Amino acid sequence: MSNEWGEDIVSDLRLLITLGKDDLESIIDELIKMDLSVSPSELGEVIKGALSEENSKYSELIAEHLIGVHNFVNKNRVTPVELLDTCKEDIESEESEWTEDEIKNWQSLYPELLKLYSNENILISTKSMDLVFDHTNLFESSNIITDIRPVYNYAEDKILSAVVAHVLRIDYLVRNDKKKISFELDHNDLELLYEACERALNRSEVTKSFMEAKNIKTIISGE
């Protein structure tokens, strides 16, 4: 574990133990019951609902910490137990800045912290986020602009007819750099695009139903 990451985790652990056993257990219970999601903001809302009013202000920090821990565990191929054991060495070392009471609280809350770091729903969510965003180009937004293009006579002093045309504009990210691209679309293109979107939405639902019938938890990205 890198020193920078180690310091961050130990610092966040110091916050977690101040929540107390009741709030930690409440978070664990809500995380077990929560719907699967790839949204950190939704995870923050679940945690906020589990915390006492006094501690609810820490919900976003806790959500970011748990996502970061699960990403770290996954990418570095360490177990939550190994991670906490490494933290234990830092927390209980002679150079530690933790007070004796904080260390006692840390030791008594170890089982709850291990459950948080081992939570399967957060593991699924963080791995899902990695899979969703594991592409060179990431879609950000789109817009279809419709305009009317007049057809003039030879003298260009009279409009003979008009053409309705469409332009699909897509904003996307390439390694955090914003890019744009535009495509000219005719009526047939719009129908094909519409049908392709309908088929994709239907495949999402069919796939989710099939996988969950096999008792495999399934997330529809962005839902």
Image: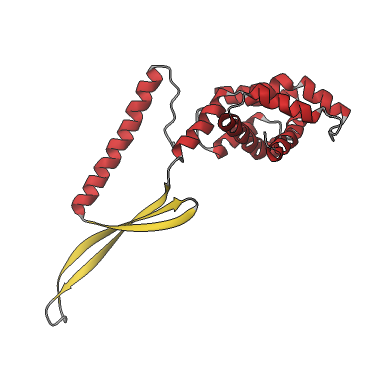
Q: Quadrant of residue 155?
A: bottom left
For this view, does 200 lie left or right of residue 34?
Answer: left
Percent position of residue 159, x then y: 16, 75
Residue at the extreme top of the image, as rendered: 214
Residue at 56% x, 38% y: name it: 40
Of residues 154 and 2, the one drawn nearer to the viewer in this rendering: 2
Of residues 13 and 208, the one drawn nearer to the viewer in this rendering: 13
Percent position of residue 84, x then y: 70, 25
Q: Quadrant of residue 6?
A: top right
For this view, does 63 lie left or right of residue 193?
Answer: right
Of residues 186 and 146, the one drawn nearer to the viewer in this rendering: 186
Q: Using the image, determine if residue 103 lies above or below residue 190.
A: above
Residue at 70% x, 40% y: name it: 4
Percent position of residue 107, x then y: 79, 21
How many discs mark residues in the rendered view? 0
Percent position of residue 183, x then y: 29, 57
